[in-house]
Amino acid sequence: MARTMFDKIWSDHEVGDGLLYIDLHLVHEVTSPQAFDGLRLAGRPVRRPDRTLATADHNVPTDGTTAARLIADRLSRVQVETLERNCEEFGIPLYSLGSDRQGIVHVIGPELGVTQPGMTIVCGDSHTSTHGAFGALAFGIGTSEVEHVLATQCLVQKQPKTMRILFQGTLTPGVTPKDLILATIGRLGTGGMTGHAVEYAGPAVEALSMPGRMTVCNMTIEGGGRAGMIAPDETTFEWVRDRSAAPADFDAAVERWRRLPSDPGAEFDTEVEIDAAAISPMVTWGTTPGMVAEVTDSVPDPAAMETAADRESAERALAYMGLKPGTPMTEIAPERVFIGSCTNSRVEDLREAAAMVDGRRVADSVRAMVVPGSQQVKATAEEEGLHEVFRAAGFEWREAGCSMCLGMNPDTLAEGERCASTSNRNFEGRQGKGGRTHLVSPRMAAAAAIEGHFVDIRDWSQR
Amino acid sequence: MRPVDVIEGKVSVLDRADVDTDQIIPKQFLKRVERTGFGEFLFYDWIRSGEIELEPAPILVAGRNFGCGSSREHAPWALEDFGFEAIVAPSFADIFYSNCTKIGLLPVILDEEHCRAVAEAGEARIDVDDETVTCAGGVFEFEVEAEVKHRLLNGLDDIGITLENATAIDAFEASGATDHVPMTTSL
């Protein structure tokens, strides 16, 4: 019988009915302390420290602090130091502050090559779906499940339904993977993928680079999807080939990986088709990622919305965002620009943003910052001189971490501040209490930094 | 966790769709390394700004896609610590739903009309074994997976159950099925 990629990976990892073996467990400081406490209370060891990898990312300052004990914020310091103690006690490899491999957990996995096709990967973080870009089954879990995986290397899981989103055509110049996924969530809604493992397919997806595929899979959770996946191909294999953790017998691995893609005729519970060529650069206007418009469009009028619930949500969102219906998206003027997060902080993202700002200056009204996704991304970018390009344009160039995506470290928005952000969530208060977030691609964020308002980069780049 | 069989009493209502876990428990409270004491920070910004009022009660009725966003289990911890024992909504985000079942906070899916009836009744009785919600507006059926139901009714530790299958996990590992997976300890 024809099987989907999801079916193949799922059945390859079934230890028993509803019990799934986990190949790689990624750990960070925020969702793990209570799990380690649970193990200690029950006197349980970590079953497979050699299938577990930890880093400090959510809390870390991006100001050049070189060790956990030097973190100024007491609670953040305690949390990162707790991770260090737990990893030492249970024998788990850790890249903490000061390590040249430290970085956002979803950036360092693919970077080290521990993220590979066909694997099951979990982490106590909803953006674990990022790793599905390699043809892995990867999803976020809560702290009870973190403890469960630490103790058993397995998870009790109900099998999700399958969905395929087929992107026909190709993205037009100036339209990025971020726009593709924002437009998709805008169309399906923030709950549109709930209960599904989603496979992104079609020519527009096959044409994407690995960083682009990671951006798409990353935001699956913003559509409610359990996991996002893309079939592995030559692009995938080339990314993994020379990484630290690449398989010793690479050809044998590739042969195995070639069997993963969904069989022709495999059936999905839900099928969606989207014309990639019709997608424009996108900007969110509200307080969920599904509240999104084309940059050439205007802020929508809640009165025109179909249901009472939608009207009410949109009205509340616009009040929070300080926006009036009918305002052209290009008249929205952010005072802050954040380029970073597990969605868009890889070298390719930084190259694209740098190309936009090269030889230009950030508008006087804007404070802009770049936060590389990892120490390795930062090092590579600096080798290429990207940091000089950003600094010359007036951007701050900072250390690796989650930073202003969720503002658990000192990088936050002030009350009422408006931000063009390459991150993944525009929820109320996400980047700081009262902060107003507009989600965009790195190129859109870079152009907004220069002009002081959003622009259609399809016209702007040609100036 | 403690067994959950019948949840009965007053109903609090939060009539909003797409309530995300960033609202349920804002990020500044995720820095705590303890598992208890999150209740006082529940809906921190919304309650303090006077945007919503919420009384502790055994049952909370909420809007569709409740608990979307981050996987933080701190969200169910805060709801439970505040005093809720069950959340009734038309739909939940997947990770949030799963997190609730792990700590014995009962997520109940009812259609919008029945959610409204429970909210209007102001009091209800939820029976896990029968899979019913009873209120002045009627008796409504809901579904709970057999595995989850078994754990809830008996207050069972998930990890303990899985470890009873340790030989199956040993056998799976011994079969070579995971031999090609990279070793994080030898990077």
Image (spheres, rainbow, N blue to C red):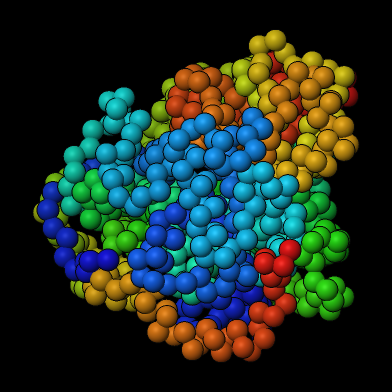
Q: Nearer the viewer, residue A361 or A295?
A: A361
Image quarter (top left, top right, bottom left or bottom right) of the N terminus of chain A: bottom right
Q: Does A16 sit left or right of B146 as displayed? A: right
Residue, x 44% and y 50% (percent of image)? B72
Q: Is residue A222 above or below residue A298?
A: below
Residue B137 on image: x %, y % = 14, 54
Report the label total.
0
Q: Does A417 sit left or right of A394 as displayed? A: left
Residue, x 31% and y 38% (percent of image)? B41
Residue A68 visible? The answer is: yes
Q: Does A155 sit left or right of B125 as displayed? A: right
Residue, x 61% and y 17% (percent of image)? A335
Q: Nearer the viewer, residue B31 or A331?
A: B31
Residue B113 visible? The answer is: no
Residue A72 on image: x %, y % = 52, 31
Residue A450 on image: x %, y % = 75, 18
Residue, x 44% and y 61% (percent of image)? A36
